[in-house]
Amino acid sequence: MIDIYIMGRRYQVPEGLTIIQALEYAGYKLIRGVGCRAGFCGACATIYNNKNDPQLRYALACQTVVEPEMYLVQLPFFPAGKAFYDLGKIKPSGEVILNLYPDIVKCLGCNSCTKSCPQDLEVMECMSDALRGDIAAVSIKSFDCVMCGLCAARCPQGLVPYNIALLCRRLYGRYLSLPSKHLQDKIEEIAAGEFDSELEELKNMSEDKLRQRYKERTIEPP
Amino acid sequence: MYPTEMEKSIAKLEATRERRLKETFPRLSLDEIESLLERFHPDFWAEGTRQLGVGPNKGDRAPKELADLLEGKSYIDPDQIDLGKIDYDVDVLIIGGGGAGASAALLAQENGASTLLVTKLRLGDANTVGAQAGTQAADRPDDSPAIHYLDTMGGGGFHNIPELVEVLVKDAPLVIRWLESLGVNWDKEPDGSMHELPGGGTSRNRMHAARDYTGLEEMRVLRDEIRNRELNVLEFSPAVELLLDSNGRVAGAILLDLETNELSVVRAKAVILATGGSGRLHYQGFPTTNHYGATGDGLVLAYRVGAKLIFMDTMQYHPTGVAYPQQILGQLVTEKVRTLGAQLVNTEGEQFINPLETRDVVASGIIRECQERQKGVVTSNGQCGVWLDSPMIDIIRGRGTIARELPAMVRQFTRFDIDITRKPILVYPTLHYQNGGIRIDASGATGIPGLFAAGECEGGVHGRNRLIGNSTLDIFVFGRRAGKAAAQWGKGVKPGSLSLEHIHRWQEETARAGLSSRPASPRLLPDYTRHEQTLASLTT
């Protein structure tokens, strides 16, 4: 058993648990601060340090194993600002980013956001890319963001990097990524009813015949 | 890193890799598949299910854990609720905040309805965010909705409801374009065409992915769109009962605020259930890939107002749940690892199943390898598993493929000091998906007037086994359809007076059936707070 401190109170928990498991072992029935339990939803953002090392560290509680003498607290919610926009009515430009998130110019370059990211993303770089209007770069670099909110919580200037990055990715997806011709073609073919008779035939087919058709289908190489 | 004992088995796997790179394990015939499933698939373990004693599916089998809740008693005393005091009054109430609920809310709003979306945790805390491999849509020139239809029917054991599969495959390319118009970033080739991979049971390469963060990408975009349109959302507010009106139509719900324990009354002209799956009920003791709130609440609510469930005796066990390390036991190792070329290998370094069979078949093959053939790898915790030979991917497709296509998986295992570009992954089946659910028609209507359902809580689309990439398709196809249909339905409805009479009737019916001692349901959240838990029994 090891000692950990949850919001300052000491608990003894077995070694090897994740922080989420340790909280539950200690008796907390979680409502906030828990979600997918697999590292994707960002609900369990956690801030911690150790008894003998005041340096703050950041983690997803479901993906991090408890250490002896860990002092931890979860970030159940953070009042991060979000710009409201109609994606269909804005343009993919640096000017739009600046209009929607004017505080971005206040970035001090302190790198607190990057240091706080439990996904190890280059958050500050994303912010300087966004400032320059390089939407593609932000999209690529921020892609693995789980929107846990730690970057916004740590930014001394009140920036909300994860929402700025989301704006950039949405602009990229809608406007900058080249359209897929074969997708468009297929949508038109479906609308024109090109597959209706074949689907109707399959729908009304006896199970035996359908099984036969299934067995005979060709499988495209990967 | 892996312990020495496991490294010995890895050495055998590495010794056969060069030979295996040239081998394709033959696919099974339909007869062989049926026999394998009957012998090894958990759906066929008789002790796992029992007959329901009450309700619209009385006499049908369901997993025991779910059956207890379906027969359960209400949290509320209907006589203590003042239905004259209406806290929220809207056209369409959406219960559930994952991909299906979000799509339904957006489409209901677009079709002129006032909406309220309520969800148990936060908006977006749902199985959608954990979906990794992608979304199916037949949009390439040599593919078609008809081929997608055939694949889906075969995957479901030919039990799927044809009308539902038809709209699933026909709407699919539209859904991909809709998501892109909202700003989803699909993986693409340099010319803009979709970068598409195969999946287990798909005869064409039609998985549309966003790295291995597909569901997260879809969900964070939809969530942002809901916020941009300033739609009403109540978080931490699950529904604990549906309301009917004096005409027997579904007319709202009772909500429970999880933080203050207050109840509130929503009146609505139509209700859409989008409550997702039930992996957190841990059927047959399996770990799960599901999010914390996946407790099958919508099934319980629907059942109490008389909605019929379908295929409740079949669950999907994802073949490749994490078997090591223990801290992330049962978490998802995306099927994309296999679609990119990784083989499944036993402790002797030999393949035993084609990795791109459907999930029910691959899961059964792994269970057979561990149980009957005793060729699994057993960890120090006693967990059996087989190897998923991930390093093959970079050999086949070039160095850097794993890092590019599977960043979530790389990150997941790096956190536990395992480098999946160099070492294989130990896997064992994990509870992943509720194949069945509330019976719907192609518009998402349940047959109970005013009640619609979308996403994992509905059933029939996938038959008895869902294919990869068809759930993140289902949630958008049927979420959109239900949103539109509910908004239109609501235009013709004048709600009568609200009633909880059906709860009285339910209590009488369960008492007559001798089931009064069943637990209160819906379950809402699992309870993992037991102090006596040992490390091996803790849940990820």
Image (cartoon, rainbow, N blue to C red):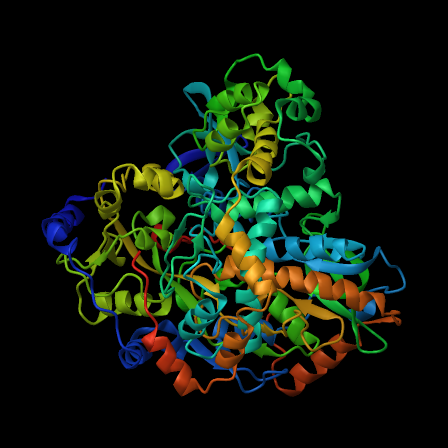
Percent x, y for residue B2? 21, 43
Question: Relative to A107, is B434 above or below?
Answer: below
Percent x, y for residue A73? 53, 32
**Residue B72's quadrant in the figure?**
bottom right
Q: Residue at x 80, y 57 (%)?
A: B113
Q: Which of these two is toward me, B320 or B109?
A: B109
**Residue B371's quadrant in the figure?**
bottom left
In the figure, is residue B508 to the left or right of A163?
A: right
**Residue B339's quadrant in the figure?**
bottom left
Q: Which of these two is toward me, B225 or B45?
A: B225
Percent x, y for residue B230? 75, 43
Q: Which of these two is toward me, B485 or A213?
A: A213
Q: Which of these two is toward me, B530 or B237?
A: B237
In the figure, is residue B113 to the left or right of A27?
A: right
For the N terminus of chain B, the quadrant is: top left
Question: Relative to B96, is B224 above or below?
Answer: above
Q: Residue at x 55, y 82 (%)?
A: B52
Q: Kindly tell me whether residue B259 is visible in this rendering.
A: yes
In the figure, is residue B10 to the left or right of A11?
A: left
Q: Residue at x 22, y 40 (%)?
A: B422
Q: Residue at x 48, y 44 (%)?
A: A40
